[in-house]
Amino acid sequence: MSNSERSGAAKVVVGRRGLPYRTQVHIEPGAQAREQRIVNESDTACSVGTGDVPVLATSQLFAWCEQASFEVLARYVPEGSTSVAMRVQIDHIRAASPGCTVTTIATLERVEGRRYVFVVSAIDDQNQELASGRVVRVLVEVQPFLAKACGSPQ
């Protein structure tokens, strides 16, 4: 058994155009990112058009949790590759008004092939949980990914 297999580091093997390529990403479950932000008026449901109350919009909280998961992987992903979110499940259970400090936390729970499963949460400045859930990110090569995007010149 190799050191990377013993340590649980992720080894990603993906097929492209019938030719396999290998991208090794060494990251251990438990890797984490924390990001702290202050809720602004522009972050509210009223401002983004998703509600009529001046509290942190679920869509904004969703984006902050997704960004935290991106930050965990960003420093490990090789040049020419990136990670993209493929599934986000968030339960937004408590409101936060402008001025509230929100900390989003993304922790790598497990690696399933080229899928990276994160547990995400958000807490306020009183250490109360605002949201929790999961984000699944997938490792992709940037150029082939963009070439397959809707609206991309072919």
Image (cartoon, rainbow, N blue to C red):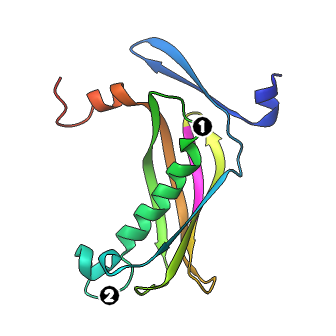
Residue type beneath disc 2: Pro
- Disc 1: CA contacts within 10 A as few (<14), some (14-19) or many (>=20): few
Which one is in front, 19 or 106? 106
Q: Secondary structure at mark 2?
A: loop
- Residue indicated by mark 2: 54
Is 74 situated left or right of 61 in this image?
Answer: right
Residue type beneath disc 1: Tyr
Based on the picture, tell me whether residue 119 belongs to the magenta stretch.
yes
Tell me: residue 31, above or below residue 54: above
- Residue indicated by mark 1: 76
Disc 2 to disc 1, C-alpha distance = 38 Å
Label 2 or label 1, whichever comes before in sequence order: 2
Region in magenta: 115-120
Tell me: residue 111, above or below residue 38: above
Q: Residue at x 58, y 83 (%)?
A: 125
Is 146 situated left or right of 24 in this image?
Answer: left
The x, y position of residue 116, in whole percent, is 57, 44
Q: Residue at x 19, y 32 (%)?
A: 152
